[in-house]
Image (spheres, rainbow, N blue to C red):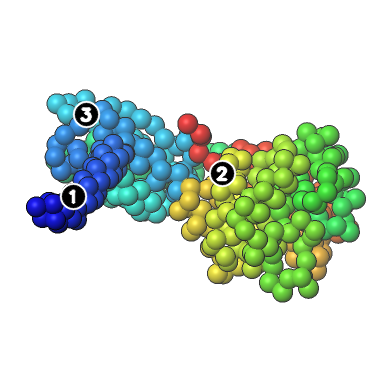
Amino acid sequence: MAKKRAASRENRTPFIVGVVVVAALLLFLAGELFAWATSDYGRIVVYRWLHVGDRPQAVRLVGKSIQKGLERAGVPATALEQKVVEGPDPQVRWIVTLERDGAPLLVNHAITRAVEAGGAQVLSGRESPGKDGELAVTLMIGVPGRPTHRLDIVRPARPDEDAPRETGKLALLLFAAAEDESLLVAAAARSEVFAIAAPATGAGKSPVLRIAHEKKREVVLFMPLEPENYPRVNPGPATLLVNMSSGQIEQRLRREIDLAAPTIAVANLMGSFATQDEAFMKAFYEELKRAHLPFLHVNGVPRSVCRALASRVGAAYDEPDVMLDAETRRGDAKALDKAWSAAVTRAHERGSAIVMLRINKRSAPWLERALTAKRLEGVELAPLSTVIRRPMAQH
């Protein structure tokens, strides 16, 4: 009898172990399901398919997804206006007013991707072209049968050519090679409004950075990034390399930003190789987002990933409108005058322009004439911080 009872217990052991394993698995799955259902994505899915949940909460979560899409599209917070559309089922109306050269369809694409990633969807959309290039894209966003947001993406019409033109803004950024650093230091003492590009050194503050801060100039940190054919082509001792880990990239960039503070942006010094590497640029952007600084991309190469990646990760990205570089090295005063006139015209036509000017023995004396009221033709010299695309406000 004892042998039979022992055999019976042995036969039940696998069954008991199986029950315990299944119970543990079910408990784990229940925990995962609960975590998913209480996540932002899970709440929207439950609201969409089971019609369970609080509408104000759904409105908040869908709005959060739309906000992410606007950030990825580089739309500043100042471009957004919010209203409530009254009715039996009130909706939130968001009006996004772009610049005159904005692209509503690109903003639409970024928002659609962000909304779908959040569990909702764009229920309908239509374009409404107007006169003189005006375009409005209207999106209804939410879940089927229950829209939560109406989003109007508006690109204003071009101004009437006969109407008085608004004063254009020209943001000037001066930079120099190492051998011309003394000329840039001297230019920083001028009275006109412009910004200074200060190169990262990896070893304290450079004379350019010191004079820029002393004269209360806006500063753009010129961060050396790995170019092709490195180290034969070497932008400096603080160069960030593609084979560095993400942690190294972020830590070294953070150190240079802290040394140069206060700064309004970070630009690349060279970087034809680094700007083609997505993993490198992602780490670079993460640190810029932490510091709440935009990236000014200078002389981008054709295979650069910078613009598209900035949109995906939500980093602020901009490019100079005009680069006065070759004219200062190989041209003459006439070439500089012609390029400067084109930059002033661009500021008039678009309302603003970012112009980068290399300071050297040719351009330093020419700058005196370029900054006169006559050569500016009614364009206003403006701080770079008022023109460059800024990061979205942190909440």
As drawn, 78 above or below 253: above
Q: Which residue is mark 1?
A: 16
Of the numbered discs 3 and 2, the one sitting upstream in the chain is: 3
As drawn, 214 above or below 358: above
Amino acid carrying mark 1 in the image? Ile
Quadrant housing residue 43: top left
Residue closer to the observer: 118 or 351: 118
Compared across the picture, whether 45 is left or right of 189 comes to left
What's the CA distance linking mark 2 and mark 1? 53 Å
What's the CA distance linking mark 1 and mark 3? 43 Å
Quadrant housing residue 336: bottom right
Circle 1: element type: helix
Residue at 34% across, 52% down: 113
Amino acid carrying mark 2 in the image? Lys
Q: Residues within 10 Å of mark 2 (few under 14, many from 20)?
A: some
What's the CA distance linking mark 3 and mark 2? 32 Å
The percent position of residue 255, horizontal first and vertical second, equals: 72, 45
Of the numbered discs 1 and 3, the one sitting upstream in the chain is: 1
Circle 3: element type: loop
Q: Which residue is mark 3?
A: 54
The percent position of residue 126, horizontal first and vertical second, equals: 25, 49
Residue at 81% across, 40% down: 212
As drawn, 127 above or below 244: above
Residue at 27% across, 30% down: 57
Q: Which residue is mark 2?
A: 289
Residue 133 in view: no
Q: Which numbered disc, 1 or 3, marks the residue closer to the eye?
A: 1
* Residue extending farthest front: 1
